[in-house]
Amino acid sequence: MAPSVATLTPPQDVPVLLKQNGANAVKTSSEVSENYEGNYRFAPIEEAQVSRAMIKRYFNMMYERAVSDVVIIGAGSAGLSCAYHLAKSRPDLTITIIEANVAPGGGAWLGGQLMTPMVVRKPADRFLQEIGVPYEDEGPFVVVKHAALFTSTVLSLVLAMPNVVLMNATAVEDLIVREDFQGRQRVAGVVTNWTLVALNHDTQSCMDPNVITAPVIISATGHDGPMGAFSAKRLVSMGLLKELGNMRGLDMNRAEPAIVNGTREVAPGLIMTGMELSEHDGSNRMGPTFGAMMASGIKAAREAIRIFDTASIVDGKVVG
């Protein structure tokens, strides 16, 4: 019988290519061993290599995405569903997701009141089928055994897509607004900072932000909370929205279709999706049922595609 993979040692004559101090050096695999019987050895590495490996990729990503096609604010269930559908439908678009929390996923890691099952009303179960998440059928709705199964699945699929990057632990502090070709105020990007900096502006005199420009911004920051409903509240404070609609009380049967059907471009350049719409429009909250989040995200992706199919965009700006 063949030995288990865990105890196999790589062939001794296969070279392992390592990069040390900027020069390529060939190290034999005798320095590396996947042996779980007391002889597990890692490839040698210098501490500076670890730093440089992260720094180079992270800041190259920031450099490349300073101009993006789409910025999605918030990586909860609506934002991730939107990113999946948009990236799959339009692999030519560069999609940048900004998430204030260290852990993306928003409230979709759990169902309701810290319980783990996730309820999804039909027909949103079709999205679960598309991404390969199993569930139990309860007639008018389905139940995923653990909400984290959905969230981890859609998150891993999104991050595997070559046209998507995620900047977590990064907060959107403001929106960039420009006058467009029609003389209207158009949302044209986001003002960003690391979340720990954004939370500590009161402790320092000046910690300036960074910016990302994009012709389409999709806001999925959820209902009111520490950083929730950010774009809706900012539209009011900058005068592009008269007043917040303010979220109404829980009514699942009214809330879910209202959120999906209300997903749209609420201001030039700004599409709103998910529970942030409840604060913008004054619709009901839905509680622990997640179908509308998935469907709203998909509709937001379709709204973004509509803009790219109908607008003239040059260097990340809508010019016609």
Image: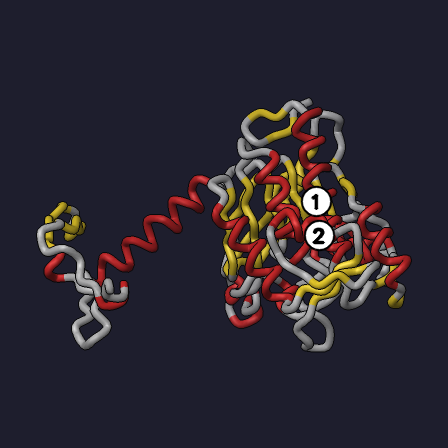
Q: In the rendered image, which residue does mark 1 sit on?
A: 298
In the image, residue 98 sits, relative to residue 32, either above or below, namely above
Q: Residue 189: x, y in percent?
A: 61, 42
Q: Residue 211: x, y in percent?
A: 53, 46
Mark number displayed over residue 183: none
- Viewer-nearest residue: 10 or 311: 10
- Kind of residue sitting beneath label 1: Ile
Q: Is residue 128 left or right of residue 4?
A: right
- Kind of residue sitting beneath label 2: Met
Quadrant of res 261: top right
Q: How many marks?
A: 2
Badge 1 marks a residue whose secondary structure is helix
Q: Is residue 234 left or right of residue 12?
A: right
Q: In the rendered image, which residue does mark 2 sit on?
A: 294
Q: Residue 3: x, y in percent?
A: 23, 65
Residues under labels 2 and 1: Cα distance? 6 Å
In the image, residue 226 sits, relative to residue 22, either above or below, namely below
Instruction: Specify how the rendered protein is coloured.
Output: secondary structure
Instruction: Bin the neighbour count of mark 1 within 10 Å (Cα to Cα): few under 14, some 14-19, many 20 and up.
Output: many
Badge 2 marks a residue whose secondary structure is helix
Quarter that holds the N terminus: bottom left
Q: Is residue 68 left or right of residue 176?
A: left
- Viewer-nearest residue: 71 or 147: 147
Q: Residue at x 50, y 39 (%)?
A: 163
Q: Is residue 300 left or right of residue 18?
A: right
Q: Residue at x 69, y 22 (%)?
A: 320
Q: Residue 157: x, y in percent?
A: 53, 50
Q: Residue at x 73, y 53 (%)?
A: 125
